[in-house]
Amino acid sequence: MISVLFVCLGNICRSPMAEAVLRHQLKERELEEKVSVDSAGTGDWHLGKPPHEGTRSLLDRYGISYEGMRARQVLINDYKAFDYIICMDSANERDVRKVFGSCSEQQTKVFKFMDLLPDKPGNDVPDPYYTGNFDEVYELVSEGCGKLLERIRREHQI
């Protein structure tokens, strides 16, 4: 099974939104048995908490499930457990690479979400915890997850 991990700061806004959206897209294409999806944060402030109310409200609006999702922190073991580790911003990527340290020889498995959207301005997915703009993040996440799914299908012939 191919595995994807989305990473943001607290694992309550951007990365759980991406996890839920990609799961939804996989289910629509009947690929949920071929690709697993998870999310984590670099910080430990929200461990065990459900996604942020803004994320939940937006996902509810689009009929996308976030059932059972709880914040967790990225772990060194995640490097071997996941094929794709996608960070929501530059600081998340830097922090993830610190966690993985010398085990991250294969640097291409860790990359920024906005690398999936090279035609969009900016290097980072804005954090709606601070901006309050969950709709902007959803638009980026929805399009980026579609691009990621295309990439996975191409790289793994599924």
Image (tube, helix red, strand yellow):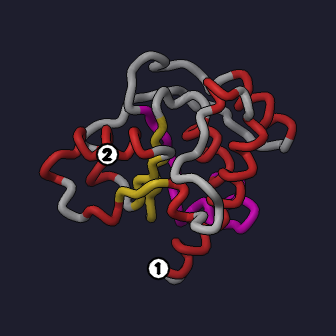
Up/down of 89 relative to 111, above or below: above
* Labels 2 and 1: the sequence-earlier one: 2
- Determine which residue is flagged by label 1: 155
The picture places residue 48, in percent across and down from the top left corner, at: 49, 19
Residue type at mark 1 is Glu
Report, in whole angstroms, how far the alpha carbon at label 2 lies from the one at label 1: 21 Å
Residue pictured at 65% horizontal, 61% vertical: 120
Q: Dot 1 lies on which element? A: helix
User: The N terminus appears in which quarter of the rendering?
Assistant: bottom left
The picture places residue 29, in percent across and down from the top left corner, at: 72, 68
Residue pictured at 63% horizontal, 54% vertical: 22
| Between 84 and 118, the one nearer to me in the picture | 118
Q: Residues within 10 Å of mark 2 (few under 14, many from 20)?
A: some
Furthest-left residue in this view: 102
Left or right, residue 104 beside residue 72: left
Q: Is 105 part of what is drawn in magenta?
A: no
Q: Which circle marks residue 78 in the picture?
A: 2
Residue pictured at 29% horizontal, 36% vertical: 75
Up/down of 29 relative to 56, above or below: below
The picture places residue 2, in percent across and down from the top left corner, at: 45, 64
Question: In the rendered structure, which segment of residues is drawn in magenta?
Answer: 23-41
